[in-house]
Amino acid sequence: MAETAGRLNATILIPAYNPDEKLLRLLPQLKEQFSRIVLVDDGPTRGQEIFAAAAGYVEKILVHERNRGKGAALKTGLRYIGGTSDVITADADGQHTCEDIVRVAIALASHRKGLVLGSRAFAGRVPLRSRFGNVWTRYFFFLMTGLMVRDTQTGLRGIPAGLVERIASIPGERYEYEMAMLADAKHHEEKPFEVPIATIYIEENRASHFNPLLDTIRIYRSLFQFCLSSVLSFLLDNGIFAAIIWMLSSKETARRDDILVAMALSRAVSSHFNYLYNRFVVFSDRKRNSTRHRSYYSYFGLVVVIALASYVLTEGSAEFFDIKGVAITAVKIVADVVLFFASYFIQRKFIFRKG
């Protein structure tokens, strides 16, 4: 398709599954503003007449023979476009206006080394599940990545040409792919830039193909698994710690020695369990031996630092408040909860970090 004077250079990428007439209302407006539009037919069971009518407005309709998910549809489009132009992804369900898509394109023209996000304000009449889901994901995403993004669930995103091939290679087939794309942004030279857009929900968002249970599990699998790993390690660590403290408290042993011995033994067992679970399950780190050994040594270097910090906090608090016996376990639990967040960030960013 030849470029028309006055049109914006970015390519619009729209994944569509069972689209309706809202897509046909959007496409003529987009064609007036953008030189390229690519549509992905994600194996719909209905709506073929919509795709037939859309053909006159788009450069290409890419087809999946069966429904593979939004992430797979986005990657099909990104691979087709490659690094030939900037890409703006938009939804087919009427939630993104042409005006807002243009705003993202204009911002993308000057934000060249990171994502541009169309971020909703979630003001006015917003379905409860959408409002709650966005607040939930915002803070858990911050916990996972250290990036604070106002609207983690937006489908309106600008991708500079230099990042298209990188983003097309990110794993994920369904809605978890969009979260993985955002998580990858922590490695970009510039943080995501957010452009305010309208908050539009049609018929309480009933047309959304997002499965609140299954897709949320996919999106947060890594964090859920890390929390499960931490809970199991927490129970193992403190169970062993309490048992040793109970055995030693019946003897005439200084409390300082009790805490040190109990913490060393309990942490030695629980940390090996935690390392193996995080490496193989949470972060899926199956690298060659040399890299694996480095992650092992790095992890247990972190264990020593965290253990020392836990010991200092536990011993100092027990001494200050004159706490004795098994009750010291409660002090240790509080200290470990505080240190949990530091441990997650360090493991995620440095020890089990993917390239």
Image (spheres, rainbow, N blue to C red):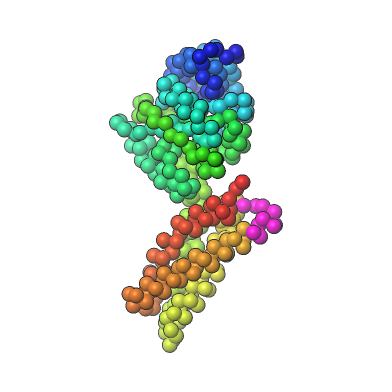
Q: Position of residue 306 (x, y in %)?
A: 49, 65
Kindly give the residue lying farthest to the bottom in the view shown.
Answer: 252
Kindly give the residue lying farthest to the right in the view shown.
Answer: 289
Between 332 and 107, the one lying in front of the other is 107
Please give the count of numbered marks on the rendered protein.
0
Q: Position of residue 148 (x, y in %)?
A: 43, 43
Tell me: 130 left or right of 354: left
In the rendered image, residue 119 lying in the magenta stretch gets the answer no
Residue at point 59% right, 40% down? 171
Q: Quadrant of residue 274?
A: bottom right
Range of magenta residues: 285-294
Question: In which quadrant will I find the N terminus?
Answer: top right
Residue at point 38% right, 69% down? 330
Residue 50 visible somewhere in the drawing: no
Between 129 and 165, the one lying in front of the other is 165
As displayed, is residue 230 above or below residue 106? Answer: below
- Label the magenta part by its dominant secondary structure: helix
As displayed, is residue 341 above or below residue 115? Answer: below
Q: Position of residue 298 (x, y in %)?
A: 59, 61
Residue at point 50% right, 29% down? 110
Tell me: 350 left or right of 200: right
In the rendered image, residue 289 lying in the magenta stretch gets the answer yes
As displayed, is residue 267 above or below residue 143? Answer: below
